[in-house]
Amino acid sequence: MTCPSLLYIYLLYISSYKSLDSRAAVTSLRRSAVGRAGRSRDHASPSRQHEPVRVSHGLCLLPLSVFVDLMAAVWQQVLAVDARYNAYRTPTFPQFRTQYIRRRSQLLRENAKCGFEPGLRRQYLRLRSQLLALRYGPLSEQSSFRASSVRSSRTTLDRMEDFEEDPRAQGARGHRRSVSRGSYQLQAQMNRAVYDERPPGSLVPTSVAEASRAMAGDTTLSENYAFAGMHHIFDQHVDSAVPRLQFANDDKHLLAGCSLDGTLSIMTLSPPPPAVKVTLKGHAGPVTDFAWSLSNDIIVSTSKDGTLRIWNTEDGRCIREVADPEGSELLCCTFQPMNNNLTVVGNSKHHLQVVNISTGKKVKGGSSKLTGRVLSLSFDAPGRILWAGDDRGSIFSFLFDMATGKLTKAKRLVVHEGSSISSITARSWISREARDPSLLVNACVNKLLLYRVVDNEGTLQLKRSFPIQHGSQPLHSIFCPLMSFRQGACVVTGSEDACVYFFDVERNTKAIVNKLQGHSGPVLDVSFNCDESLLASSDAAGMVIIWRREQK
């Protein structure tokens, strides 16, 4: 079936050879296609080596599988160009802009399946970019992203500091008391033993973990994380940044996000069509963070209005409001994983506090002070260690008393002086091949950082770093939910260049597994549903995109 739009592109492409004889142009194009097809077959898998080269309109084209992959990559670039210019279209009608991007995504996805030389699509991409630049002018945001540079000052990545304990918190012999962490000490010993036996740099399940690989479908990372198609776009928070986004626990279709417009949205993706289930209204200032309870029946949120609110997720009713005694802005929150009656909150006056959401009161002994504004929080899986990051470039670890809710400051890591720690995510890689608890960190140093937790006090050791554009925005990243059950491991992060990046933490070179383009501004947060079939991403322009995994 012929695609009219691609016929038009074909004519544009052939016209570029106007200084040559038309037959010579066709012959040149045919030779180019045959050469690329031959090289592709030489390196292809056995199943692709016998795949015929497609012929259309006298031109020899690429094998179908390679051709489809190239087309999908190019149409994503076309969509990214359209998304970046989308803010200039009908500035008074944001809904039209969303409908435009949806329709463009649909058309480009359909055209990518048509049988034409990928070079024609690249030619279209160049012409499209030139026409949009003539119509709306050059993109200042894009140029500013490229102009941003990595800071040249020295970075301290592994300087750990012990804290002097209050004598009352020490035992009879002067040793620090254990805070319900015997099992974590055993786990740390197992981690060190297994780590010493593995090859250097090995962080993830190896090829001998056949049972784990079978659970993941025995697919490669590139195949499993081939996200491209847009499933849906939400725009209820348009023109106000959506800093946090999170799927409900163990749920495929329930998603929530908070916005700087002072509201939160709970969205449902099934049954179709996707829709906003309920809007949580009540905060008098921008909403900075939120967290789902384990049962998904409650959401806690923090705001710059200085309040913590507890919401009923079914009807959107605010159950309780807890004001900060200091009247400071609340910037982040997280549930205690083993006791959802307790929530930890960080504020702009450098304080960390454990709050009992049933009573609305602060837990005695459950407070501490950091060196800067508290921006990010994360517990380990057992809930015995809490990490907190501030805007001065430090990550603190705290021992959490499961019985009383008290916090004991343990360690400090200076990532980079003066650089905000916008996101911390903890993950215990519990499997036969990878038992190392790890920490994924977004810091404003144009890198995504991966640390290994080396002991039962939360001491961190840098293992890998991945280049991204991150200079000032509150970016977030995640571990992939099924990472422990396949060969290789993947992490996903937003970036200030309006892209979503997938990194394989096992690769020493070319670690990028996938790159999604379609946002018009910095991508602030990303979230997987429980089976990794959908990925959600939000940006500084208020757009939420749901990406669908390609079916192989």
Image: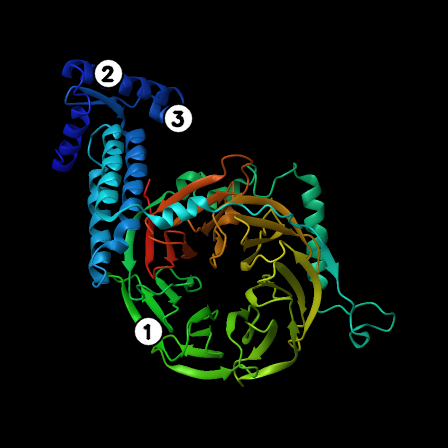
x%, y% of residue 439? 59, 54
Q: Nearer the viewer, residue 310 or 371?
A: 371
Amino acid type of the residue that numbered disc 3 sits on in the rendered structure: Ser
List the residue tagged with mark 2: 28
Q: In the rendered structure, are the residues bearing label 3 and label 2 in contact, judged by CB atoms less than 8 Å apart?
A: no
Nearer to us of marks 1 and 2 is: 2
The residue at the point 31 percent across, 17 percent down is: 35
Residue at the limit of the structure toward the right, as seen here: 173
Amino acid type of the residue that numbered disc 2 sits on in the rendered structure: Ser
The residue at the point 58 percent across, 51 percent down is: 429
x%, y% of residue 398? 67, 66
x%, y% of residue 155? 64, 49
Q: Earlier in the sequence, mark 3 or mark 2?
A: 2
Disc 1 is placed on an element classified as: strand
List the residue tagged with mark 3: 45
CA gap, disc 3 and disc 2: 28 Å
Q: Nearer the viewer, residue 333 or 359?
A: 333
List the residue tagged with mark 1: 279
